[in-house]
Amino acid sequence: MAEIGHGGKEIVERILEPKEAVERIKGLKSIPVRDQIAKEVINIGYGFFTPLQGFMGKDDLDSVVKTMKLKDGTIWSIPILFDLSEAEVSDYGIKAGDTVLLTYEDNPLAIFEIEEIYTYDKKEICQSVFGTTEEKHPGCARTYKYKDKFLGGKITLVNRPKINPPFEPFFIPPLQMRKIFREKGWQRIVAHQTRNVPHTGHEWLMKGAWLQAYGELPIEKPIVGVLVNAIIGEKRKGDYIDEAIILTHQKLNDAGYFGPHNHMVSLTFWDMRYAGPKEAIFHSMLRTNLGLTHHMFGRDHAGVGDYYDPYDAHRLIISVQDELRIKPTFSMNWLYCPHCGEVTNEGLCNHKDEWQKFSGTLIRSIVMDGVKPPRLIFRPEVFDLVMECAEKYGFGSPFVTDEYLEKRTPVFTIPPLKA
Amino acid sequence: MAEIGHGGKEIVERILEPKEAVERIKGLKSIPVRDQIAKEVINIGYGFFTPLQGFMGKDDLDSVVKTMKLKDGTIWSIPILFDLSEAEVSDYGIKAGDTVLLTYEDNPLAIFEIEEIYTYDKKEICQSVFGTTEEKHPGCARTYKYKDKFLGGKITLVNRPKINPPFEPFFIPPLQMRKIFREKGWQRIVAHQTRNVPHTGHEWLMKGAWLQAYGELPIEKPIVGVLVNAIIGEKRKGDYIDEAIILTHQKLNDAGYFGPHNHMVSLTFWDMRYAGPKEAIFHSMLRTNLGLTHHMFGRDHAGVGDYYDPYDAHRLIISVQDELRIKPTFSMNWLYCPHCGEVTNEGLCNHKDEWQKFSGTLIRSIVMDGVKPPRLIFRPEVFDLVMECAEKYGFGSPFVTDEYLEKRTPVFTIPPLKA
């Protein structure tokens, strides 16, 4: 059975088995890649980026910049680029038509069939993707850091990443994910994008989206599931540590606030671009490839600063909804209402003067105080686990510190290749 | 603008203005009608029963019994019949082709253009509508009490009912209701069928249905409303008194658990038939005529005893959904989970061993004790109002007693007709 992903294209899986890989890489020049590129190579190989089979050539990049579509007409919002400096191109002695081996941490990662080497105006990319060319926008900053030459061409993984504890169970690529959904019998699956430890506001965002996706389905038993898909990528100081994010979401399931019948947790490797609306489109593409049917979008999805109107992402999604294979569920804020005595929704409850909104700052200060908050704000099992993660993985802190950045176990490593 | 109701037919409104009414009833024979028939006359006149313009003739009845459709092909599930005994027909000296005046409490109610007088096998009606011919089924009992002759023909109201306090604001016929919905800007409106004082389980049923109807709507502001449509009809001892039902639902709105932006309360006069699936269809027809787009159906909707499987109503609705102009939202149970510390849904929470389900009996015993329950079970404002209603309208009890049945102010009266 063909697994159909974004753009109606069959899910890409470009991974060689070790025996063939060992043969195929013989004699290839090696080019080491940095962390971001390694993650994107993995995503291409496993089909997270379907229909992309490799890094973009100039035609695709130009088409994405100018029309938000690949040159074949498929919606695509964020360029996937492989960059080298002119000096590197020259030092490696590579040219269009060459095939090279990409390595990560000195081990073989993927075969890269270089189809073209080109340049492109980074400001034009920034203006299109981020709506700004300002260097203080983190997406622009990342783009400006690309070196001057882009290399387009197909990627084939020669080595599967080793996912390190405690992340192993959560790396579930598209084909495997779709198999799990079929086993669970889920017919509608709604994506929850997260980089947070969940408070009850997040929990009810998911519960509300579950109800929204449940909609008018004429069924006796729930066949709707929520997939928490944590974005694991570059960390900044003050972020929650990855281990706490993923394990606490799983804890909501293990502790019964959800159950295996309606909820699961996974991760996708991706360095956030903070592209707001364009990143919302990108997330919907990723989750389509994972087999999801619905995607939650809250206010200012994947935004940063005040670059985007809180509903720009919604508007862009709506404008191309017919070309996406995933339906947006639009989330309103959930908050704690002391009058109702419970978590409720700003669209439902009218005790506006009494509402206590969940703010990242509030929750952060609760966590920092280390005093267990009320279960209607933060589930006790989640709180305990945050503290445990701080000790076990965070060098005493649930938030990213310099020490964490320096000493943490990486989420994945690339092992030596053995036939 | 034509207002389109059930079956795609324009909303019926057959009501004469007093001046014309006084002229038209001159010289007509008077036939007094009992309470059930008066309510159905009012419903026909105001278009609650669109496309019916009167009581059913034999062809329509036969078609409904055999195919669940009127003879013009419109889905219709419960016969609307006007009955007289053979002796009455003879005593009144009426025959097909006659026009008579129907009176209620000695005042003029409606003109009835008798088109035919016929008989029909009541057991056949019962088997079709209730799936049983057992006399202990309250719908069968009501059917067997019909006298032997049925009269079909058009109804025209000559007099509007006077709705007595505290019910006046809640009688909102189809054309007026649709105007209100337009003013509120609601695009999706979901019906909550009730004959209960609401506990938090009911409140969340409505809130959940609101989220379900909200669904994938690409909107910034909520444009979904819940209409509580209380069925006001024959009471049995032990039921909540009508005043408590309707006022407490309004109280949920006034006290901010909902607000005018997402919730309103109205009533429909109807003696429940307890026809389960067929009554579910009937309710969906009524609410279509009121301008609603969605209808909540829970377990064993309008059922009685163990005559129907809890999901028979759902199955029947699904089987004819394409012919209805209203979409079902299927409700799961909401319950109190002490582990979550809040009201939650059996499809969401997995603390099955700890669930405290809301039972009518539990809530009833809370109300009888007169001790204010926790706000997560029963809203304090609702509780206080139930007690107030008991004093003000219930002769000391929030439940129907013999004294209430005997002494209560009727919900509506028919005033003298003045030109």
Image (cartoon, coloured by chain):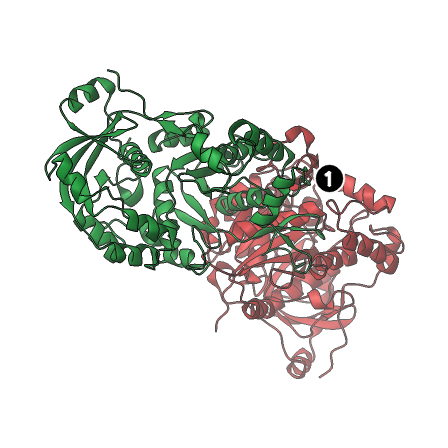
Chain colours: A red, B green
Q: Is residue B262 left or right of residue B78?
A: right
Between B192 and B398, the one lying in front of the other is B398
Please identify the quadrant where the C terminus of chain B is shown: top left
| Residue at 82% from the left image edge and 43% from the top image edge | A366
Between B81 and B381, the one lying in front of the other is B81
Residue B229 appears in the figure: yes
Between B345 and B338, the one lying in front of the other is B338
Residue A296 appears in the figure: no
| In the rendered image, the vertical position of residue B407 relative to residue A155, given as above or below | above
Between B391 and A230, the one lying in front of the other is B391
Q: Position of residue B208 (x, y in %)?
A: 55, 46
Q: Position of residue B295 (x, y in %)?
A: 43, 46
| Residue at 33% from the left image edge and 48% from the top image edge | B142
Q: Is residue B166 left or right of residue B9?
A: right
Give, as a three-letter code, the residue at label 1: Ser
- Number of disc labels: 1
SS of the residue under disc 1 = loop
| Residue at 61% from the left image edge and 68% from the top image edge | A46
Q: Is residue A419 left or right of residue B40?
A: right
| In the rendered image, the vertical position of residue A65 relative to residue A175, given as above or below | above
Instruction: Name the subunit of mark 1.
Output: A
Q: Residues within 10 Å of mark 1 (few under 14, many from 20)?
A: few
Q: For mark 1, what is the residue? A: A359
| In the rendered image, the vertical position of residue A83 relative to residue B174, given as above or below | below
Q: Position of residue A362 (x, y in %)?
A: 78, 39
Please identify the quadrant where the N terminus of chain B is shown: top left
Q: Is residue A6 left or right of residue A258?
A: left
